[in-house]
Image (tube, rainbow, N blue to C red):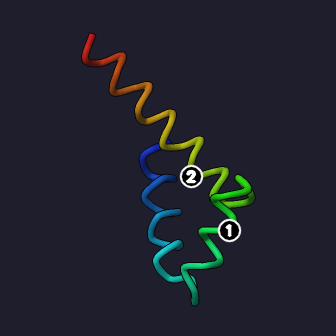
Amino acid sequence: MAFDLASKLSAERALTPSPLIWKIKRLFNLGTEKQLRGAINRVNDLAEEDSM
């Protein structure tokens, strides 16, 4: 589920009218960028667990 969410949010990021919008949201860890960061962290954690 985390991978699906990360993929969806990444695609939505690509559709934003200006990269400045998502860059500011990422800088301040707001909204969808906060969700994206969390989803990516969960995917990374799961990948680490599987590799051990």
The residue wearing badge 1 is: 24
Query: Is disc 2 in contact with disc 1, using a CB cutoff of under 8 Å?
Result: no
- Residue 48's mark? none
Q: Amino acid at mark 1?
A: Ile
Residue depicted at x 47% and y 64%: 10
Kindly state the secondary structure of the residue where label 1 is placed.
helix
Residue depicted at x 73% and y 60%: 31
Which marked residue is nearer to the observer: mark 2 or mark 1?
Answer: 1
- Residue 36's mark? 2
Horizontally, residue 25 falls left or right of residue 12, namely: right
Residue 1 in view in this figure: no
Residue depicted at x 56% and y 52%: 36
Whichever of callouts 2 and 1 sits on the residue coming sooner in the sequence is 1
The answer to which image quadrant residue 17 occupies is bottom right
Horizontally, residue 40 falls left or right of residue 32, namely: left
Q: Amino acid at mark 2?
A: Leu
- Tell me the quadrant of the picture where the C terminus can be found: top left
The answer to which image quadrant residue 25 occupies is bottom right
Q: Residues within 10 Å of mark 2 (few under 14, many from 20)?
A: many
